[in-house]
Structure formats: C-alpha cells, structure tokens
C-alpha cells in the first residue's frame, strides 16, 4: 500500500493541492484560481470563504483524479501567501470582512505616521521587519477600527485573527484549532522574533487584543486532525510554513548561508542565517525561516517587485513576444544588450534602493537598438536586481554566498540563469522538482509524523536538474557600471 503527504499551497491568485510520494516526487496536482477584488486604487481583497471552499475542492479533486484514498494520506502540510489578514467570528466561523491581501496599501498613511514617531528601530529590533502596510498588524487595526462593533467583539474574545494558513487550519479542524506557525507569525509585525512570543508593547501600539491571536507553534508540529466530515478520514495536519520560507526548506537550504531565489511575478530571495537573527543595515528583512523541535532557524529576506512581470509587460504591453517563453530566443538574436539598461521600476524601486518615486527606465537607446537588445536587457535586469540583493545579503550577513538555488516560472529560462551565473559569479542551481514551495511544507509535515525519519533522509531527495556555472564575460563590468548609473537616473523621477 502506498502512503503520501498532501501539500496545500494557498497562493495569492490560485490554490493548489499537491500529493508527494515517499521519494519526494509529485504524484498528483489540482489547481483552482479564485477571485481578486480591487474595491479602490491600492486596495486588494480576497473572499476568505472562497479561499476555504476552493482549497477544499482542490483536495477533493486531487484525491479523486489520482484515485488516492484519504486514509493513504499520512499528513497534510499547509503553505500560504503570507501577511494576508482574516478576522472571523469564533461562534459562526464567518469572516467579518473580506481578507486584506498583503499587496493592499490602505494602511500606508498610518504606517507613515508610525515612522514619523520614530518607531522604526524599535519595530525592527523586535520583529525584524520594516514599518510597512505589507504586514498584518496595521491591517488588523484597520478591520477593528472600520467594521462596526468589531473592536468590542474582539475585546470580549469573540473574534479570531489569522493569516491564510491559520484560517484553513481552523476550517479543516471545524474550529477545533486556532494556531499558526512561527514563520507566519513573524510576518504579522506583532511577534517578537527574539523571545518568540506575541509582543505586548506592539499589541498596545496597534490596539490589538491578544485574545484574538492564534497560538504559535513550530513549523513541523502535529496541529490536529482534519474533521472526518470533510474527506471521510481524520488526516493529521503536521506542517505549516509561509510560502517563501517553505520554498527555502524545499530547496534544502538548511545550512547557514544557503540562499534561494524564486523567479515568479516578482523575485523573492531568502538566505538561511541559522540560529542568528541578522539585523539588516540595508533594508532587508530578518524573519523566522522555520522551527523544528526547539530549534529556530532565522533568515534574511529581500524582495523584488517586478521579475517575471517584466517579461509579461514585453508580451502584453510592448507585444514584442507572444508568450513568455519566446523571450529567450529573442534575446539570443543578439550576443549582448548593445548598451541598453532596463530598470523595471514599474512600482517604484524595492530593496536595497527603496524609492517609491522611482519609475521604469529604458536607457542607452541608439538607432541600432533592436527588439533583441531590449529582450536581453530585460533578462539582465532580472539578474541584476537579484545581484543587488545578493550583494546586500553578503554585506549584512558577512557570509559569502557560494551558490544560488532557483525556482519559479522564470527559472525555466536557461539564458536568464546563465546571465545570473555570469553577473553573480556563482553557480546557479535549478532543482529537479520545481514545486519547491509545496515540497518544503510536505517535508516539514512528513518530518513531524515520522513519514521521513530525519533531515538526512530528506536531503538525499533534493536533486539538481541543471547547474549554470559562471562564464567569463568581459562585458559584465560595463553592465554593472551602467546598471548603477541607470538606477540613479530612475530614482525620484516622480517626486514633485
Ligand atoms: P507567480 O507564482 O508569481 O504567479 P510563476 O512562478 O508562475 O509566478 O511564474 C510566472 C512568471 O514567470 C510570469 O511573470 C512570466 O512572465 C514568467 N516566465 C514564465 N516563463 C518564462 C520564461 N521562459 N522566461 C522568462 N520569464 C518567464
């Protein structure tokens, strides 16, 4: 009889259920998209009830499609879009409002006020985060301030807060378990990552009653059983991790200094910093990677807003390609980018520049500039943004990065990864299983239940598909120099 681990991957635009076998291979996958709501400029919401019903359907579908019995699933792991905030009524189980998504900017002004009060270093020291509307704390405050009667209900213990993992756990257990894991807690801006508890001072600052918060548990932990009414069998839920941390684990970046980048719409880089919190002097985030048993592993994180989205823009707006995969062939029509630099500051510049007034900039154009040059410059831009973060991580951590493990949609592009190797002068490694986010939490869940005995056993399952070794390219220094110049030109463009 075969036994499996089921991963629930609750993403920002779609939800998936993926079944892994004992050798870490994918044996089944089901995916469903769900609705995005944009009620005002800068606001992004999800329907939390739809998140749950859609996720439940992916599980039913995948079991049916691959003819796997619920009793053959040894454990479930949950990985999720992080920071997205849901508040619900404990008695009815119904959300009091739509979920406020991580991208939502409605609390930006409030966050600016906190910065003006000089709270940045206190918050960074306690949570590892920079003050921003991105994180959950200001979103919870907004809900309590804006939904009629919510604050009273929260103070009397009638409301529960959770990120998407916590909401799914609550529903899977029919309200029996209200808990989250340390990696998700560390993105709320309410959790003290030094002493590993909800921080009283921050709860007071954001006016959030502690009674509404979930219990915080290790990432590899027996959280409870799925109510048997859902799938006919009480499956244990034994792993939870935020998506980027889960991908770091799926990539088996389990030693200090090991780093991964996910090349999706944006790019997310995370470096394992072991048992040490490294406080960034260059606006990277310190965060909890995971906790296994009593051992907490920390990480340093830097995000790039526009990665693969630059290729989408060339496809949908400039229309120089029909599909994202065509970019590689177009970029190969030239051997270098002809002095073109593309700064993809479409939504401002992220780490390490942090300039909300920066814009997209295409510079160095001459009469000989071709579509090929622009395509190549776009791939170089993705690589150079990653390089900026890698450099910053090395500076902050004083750890030399030896290799970069990569995944995500744009990691299918061989030329991009070769350029990345050449500019960063390190090996770029693409794994055999590209679904590292789902795989990471499957590993965490399997570890907690003894499906896999230990990390050594799991480590043997991770394997590379292709390694890109750096090749000498005498144009690199020029590109790097021009990149820095172009970034300066893009900065503060929108500033009045
Ligand atoms: P997300 O999880 O953020 O939705 P994915 O990991 O699915 O993203 O990756 C999708 C992104 O990858 C898109 O932005 C797309 O433009 C980009 N992409 C897909 N294939 C390629 C390719 N061959 N070369 C470069 N970019 C690509």
Image (spheres, grey):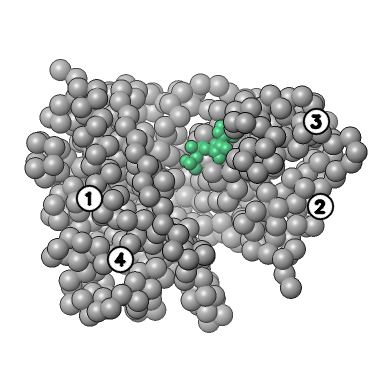
The first of marks 4 and 3 along the sequence is 4
Between the residue at mark 3 and the residue at mark 2, the CA separation in whole angstroms equals: 18 Å
Q: Which residue is drawn at 38% across and 62% down?
A: 100
Residue where numbered disc 4 is placed: 97
The first of marks 3 and 2 along the sequence is 3
Between the residue at mark 2 and the residue at mark 4, the CA separation in whole angstroms equals: 46 Å
Quarter of the figure with residue 73: top left
Does the closest atom of ligand 1 sit within 8 Å of the Cβ of label 1?
A: no
> Which circle marks residue 486 in the picture?
none
For the question of whether residue 166 can be seen, the reply is: no
> Which circle marks residue 485 in the picture?
2
Most foreground residue, 41 or 288: 41
Between the residue at mark 1 and the residue at mark 4, the CA separation in whole angstroms equals: 19 Å
Location of residue 328 with respect to 357 vertically, above or below: above
Between the residue at mark 4 and the residue at mark 3, the CA separation in whole angstroms equals: 51 Å
The first of marks 1 and 4 along the sequence is 4
Q: What element carries label 4?
A: loop
Residue where numbered disc 1 is placed: 169
Residue where numbered disc 3 is placed: 336
Quarter of the figure with residue 118: bottom right
Q: What element carries label 3?
A: loop
**Dot 2 surroundings within 10 Å: few (below 14), some, or many (20 or more)?**
few
């Amino acid at each position: 009889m075969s036994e499996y681990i089921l991963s629930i991957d609750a993403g920002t635009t779609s939800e998936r259920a993926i079944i892994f076998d004992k050798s870490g291979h994918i044996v089944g996958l089901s995916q469903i998209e769900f609705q995005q709501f944009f009620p005002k400029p800068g606001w992004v919401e999800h329907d939390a009830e739809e998140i749950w019903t859609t996720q439940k359907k992916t599980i039913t579908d995948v079991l049916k499609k691959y003819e796997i019995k619920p009793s053959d699933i040894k454990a479930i792991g949950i990985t999720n879009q992080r920071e997205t905030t849901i508040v619900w009524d404990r008695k009815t189980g119904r959300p009091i409002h739509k979920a406020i998504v991580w991208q939502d900017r409605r609390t930006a002004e409030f966050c600016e006020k906190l910065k003006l009060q000089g709270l940045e270093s206190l918050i960074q020291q306690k949570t590892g985060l920079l003050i921003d509307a991105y994180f959950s704390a200001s979103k919870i405050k907004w809900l309590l301030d804006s939904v009629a009667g919510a604050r009273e209900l929260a103070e009397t213990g009638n409301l529960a807060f959770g990120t998407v993992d916590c909401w799914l756990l609550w529903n899977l257990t029919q309200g029996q378990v209200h808990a989250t894991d340390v990696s998700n807690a560390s993105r709320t801006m309410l959790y003290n990552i030094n002493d590993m508890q909800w921080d009283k001072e921050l709860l007071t600052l954001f006016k959030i009653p502690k009674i509404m918060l979930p219990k915080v548990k290790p990432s590899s932990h027996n959280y409870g059983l799925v109510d048997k009414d859902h799938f006919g069998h009480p499956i244990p839920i034994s792993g939870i991790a935020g998506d980027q941390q889960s991908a770091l684990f799926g990539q088996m970046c389990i030693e200090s200094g090991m780093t991964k980048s996910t090349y999706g719409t944006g790019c997310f880089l995370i470096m394992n910093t072991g048992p040490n919190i490294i406080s960034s002097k260059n606006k990277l985030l310190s965060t909890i990677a995971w906790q296994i048993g009593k051992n907490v592993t920390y990480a340093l994180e830097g995000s790039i807003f526009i990665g693969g989205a630059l290729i989408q823009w060339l496809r949908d707006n400039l229309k120089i390609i029909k599909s994202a995969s065509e970019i590689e062939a177009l970029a190969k029509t030239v051997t270098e980018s002809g002095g073109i630099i593309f700064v993809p500051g479409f939504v401002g510049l992220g780490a390490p520049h942090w300039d909300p007034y920066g814009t997209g900039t295409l510079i160095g154009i001459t009469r000989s500039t071709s579509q090929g040059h622009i395509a190549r410059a776009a791939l170089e831009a993705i690589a150079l943004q990653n390089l900026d973060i890698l450099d910053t991580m090395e500076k902050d951590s004083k750890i030399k990065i030896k290799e970069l493990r990569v995944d995500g949609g744009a990691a299918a592009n061989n030329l991009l990864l070769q350029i990345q190797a050449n500019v960063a002068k390190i090996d770029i490694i693409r794994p055999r299983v590209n679904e590292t986010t789902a795989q990471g939490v499957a590993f965490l869940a399997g570890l907690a239940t003894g499906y896999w005995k230990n990390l050594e056993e799991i480590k043997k399952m991770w394997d590379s598909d292709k390694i890109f070794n750096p090749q000498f390219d005498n144009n690199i220094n020029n590109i790097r120099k021009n990149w820095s110049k172009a970034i300066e030109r893009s900065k503060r463009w929108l500033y009045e």
